[in-house]
Amino acid sequence: MNLTRLRTLVMVARSGNISKAALDLHLSQPAVTKHIQSLEEYYGKSLIDRSAREAVLTEEGHLLYRYAVEILRLMDEADTALAEVSKTVQGSLRLGASSIPGQYILPFVLGEFNRSYPDVDLVVEMGDTGQITRLVLENNVDLGLVGNRVKERQLECYPCAEDELVLILPLDHPLAQVEEIRAADLYREKIVWREVGSGTRKTVEGWLAQAGVKLEEKKGDLELGSTGAVVAAVEAGLGLSIVSIWAVVRPLAWKTLAVRRLKDLSMKRQLYVIRSTQNTRRSAQAFLDFILGDEGKRALDQIFAEIPWFSEQE
């Protein structure tokens, strides 16, 4: 018994003709005849009156026809219902994020995502890139947002946003009045650092080393445990620092510090979203499609929309 044979019976009954039913079903006449014979063998009843010139159903054939129509209707209804359910994303979404995407990007993106998917319950865990990678690999979070490309065979890694590290200075600092600042100009300055082991600090030190500049910690330097604390220290006049542009969107808009690009060193990078190849949860796919698509891009663009500095400096 299968639905194809029931569908053949319905088509034969409606057309009253084996050849026409075969044409409508894109089958050969022998195939249609075989389907009817299979149903007759299954039920042990004759379904077509073979003494008639046309395909006329017997009493048993009419009875099965009525049930077949209802069965096929219910199956179509089930297909429609399942298709509708597949459009509805619900349940939980567990995200992991390192410092920059977690503090400065996710809050904006999640607001827009929640408006599009109100039935998804969101949970966010913070950590450094290594910690987030482990959480994704162990399936403790569905997706991770990190500041460096992760090379693991079991992970998919997608660039999701641009980032740039920039020099930040107190408004009254002499270098804030200089049109062009080079990496070597930082030698004699007090620096506010992230803690040793910070991904951003490693990136900064690596880029400066490529430019031939190695900033040894010196008297007067300051080390803090979060990007927010670093920005606040620079606003308070405690030194200079290099941080993600995402971290200074509001201070720049409020004009509480100065932001500069180094003349001789480009510090642009990508932020990434990572997912285990084993994770097929619908909520995870919905968020991935969102942040990589036009909706996510619009959400990120809105953050910078009111700040002219970015376009002016390009």
Image (cartoon, rainbow, N blue to C red):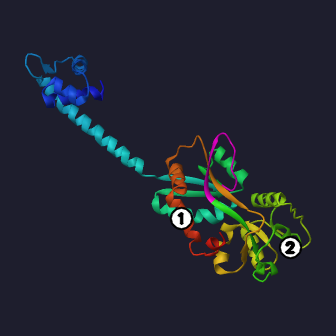
Residues at badges 1 and 2 in contact (C-beta under 8 Å)?
no
> Where's residue 57, x and y in %?
12, 24
> Where's residue 300, x and y in %?
57, 64
Q: Residue lying farthest left? A: 52
Residue occupied by mark 2:
190
- Give the left or right position of residue 299, taking residue 49 as reference: right
> Where's residue 264, x and y in %?
78, 65
Whether residue 64 is visible, yes or no, is no
Question: Circle 2 — which element?
Answer: loop
Residue occupied by mark 1:
299
Q: How many marks?
A: 2
Give the answer, above or below, for where 67 lies relative to 52: below
Q: Residue lying farthest right? A: 219
First to last magenta residue range: 146-161
Q: What distance separates the C-alpha of mark 1 from that of mark 2?
A: 36 Å
Whether residue 121 is visible, yes or no, is yes
Does residue 184 show up magenta in the picture? no
Which residue: 66% across, 44% down?
A: 137
- Give the left or right position of residue 240, taking residue 142 as reference: right
The amino acid pointed to by label 2 is: Lys
The amino acid pointed to by label 1 is: Ala
Question: Circle 1 — which element?
Answer: helix
Give whichever of discs 1 and 2 has the lower sequence position.
2
Q: Residues within 10 Å of mark 2 (few under 14, many from 20)?
A: some
Q: Residues within 10 Å of mark 1 (few under 14, many from 20)?
A: some
Which residue: 75% across, 60% down?
A: 200
- Res 266 label: none
Residue 56 sits in which quadrant? top left
- Give the left or right position of residue 279, taking residue 254 as reference: left
